[in-house]
Amino acid sequence: MSSLQKSVLKSRLPPAVPSSTRSRDGSFKKNRQKDYTPTMWSEYFHEQKDVKIDNQHFRVYLSRSPTEESGPLIVLLHGGGFSALTWSLFVTEITAVLHCQCMAIDLRGHGDTKTTDDQDLSATTLATDVAKVLEALYPENPPPIMIVGHSMGGAICVHISHLRLIPTLLGCVVIDVVEGTAMDALASMQSFLRSRPSHFKSIQHAIEWSIRSGQIRNVDSAKVSMPGQIVNCGSGLLATNELPLPTGETESSPPIKFTNPLAISEDAELETTDEPTVFPSFKTPTDLTDNKKYRWRIDLASSEKFWTGWFEGLSQKFLDLPVPKLLLLASIDGLDRTLTVGQMQGKFQMQVLARCGHAVHEDRPHEVAEVIASYMVRNKFAKPSTDFVRQMPAC
């Protein structure tokens, strides 16, 4: 059995496309190495602000449709460990087809938000934070608001709506989080977190890891979102504060060789070596002060005591919300019993997008934008600014 066949069997995935492709002149040439140079938030959002509330600063990113008609405000809440920049490509897509505004928030303990207690990640605290940010930004005549959340952020969306913290709420969109599957996954969450590299030697290395590990399957999205998830070990600043990179530091790192059997197979990964290169763990004081090395912005493992509170009772709370609801999933297998019954009774709209990972809105931002835009137009929450493919409800 060849080394290629062994690698394919080990990964349990179909074989990758051969690393050579035919050029226009008919000859075969090696594919170019992928570019993992990070991109800046300003390529996707119009503005960033720090909203001050009781000596706490919440970072928000704002964008709008390129029209005079402002439309409703779409509030975007990221998942645990992510940041507001996870919505970058989605924001570009939704504002291109809908008269709307978008606001993405770095939740407490994430991104460039700084609070007096970054360790308090309870559902009530996170929900209250979002409500206070909106109140500070719109003290009078707040716009109609559609709230959208992914994973942990989806759970917080439900809590916000359940507690009726937003008086002008139009509807609630939850992306790839269901109580049953989330609660079942908690038992293995610590093991998953330990399997991730604790440090990265460069921003490009972090971006490459996110793609090759399968956390994100869209390189363009990873290039803008990953810098919002890591901090410089020396300065303690979010990696986004170092962008754009100085000239000479924008070239990609050497390809990473993965030994994880569940890693996504790519051409470079199928090249076998005696001693594959893996991400090292930097534990010495000297390493931790080296500003060329990065760590995760948030220690998700230490937030375990809040996990149950995010998801417990989530399905019934979602069904009981008095506003229109949309559940967007990466797999139909994710539904639990409560939501399956609710879906059969037509209590909410559901859409499934295949061929994507957990970060649905990063992997397929165009399709997610079409689904949410169709949902908002159908419910007369917003007006389309151009023709686009209308997604029919799946239920």
Image (tube, rainbow, N blue to C red):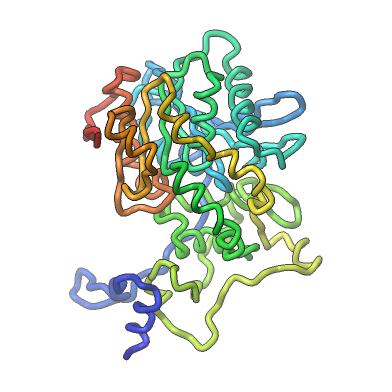
Q: Which quarter shows the N terminus?
A: bottom left
Residue at image position (64%, 49%) is 304
Q: Is residue 47 left or right of residue 100?
A: right
- Examine the rendering and report whether any part of residue 331 can be seen: yes
Frontmost residue, 157 versus 163: 163
- Measured from the top left, where is residue 197 in percent x and y? 60, 65
- Measured from the top left, where is residue 168 in percent x and y? 48, 14
Residue at image position (50%, 29%) is 103
Frontmost residue, 40 versus 328: 328
- Measured from the top left, where is residue 225 in percent x and y? 51, 48
Q: Which quarter shows the C terminus?
A: top left
Residue lying furthest bottom: 1
83 is higher (above) or lower (below) than 317: below
- Examine the rendering and report whether any part of residue 248 can be seen: no
- Measured from the top left, where is residue 16 in percent x and y? 31, 72
Question: Which quadrant of the structure image shows residue 170?
Answer: top left
Residue lying furthest left: 26
Residue at image position (60%, 12%) is 139
Residue at image position (42%, 43%) is 176
Residue lying furthest right: 285
User: How many numbered marks, from 0 up?
Assistant: 0
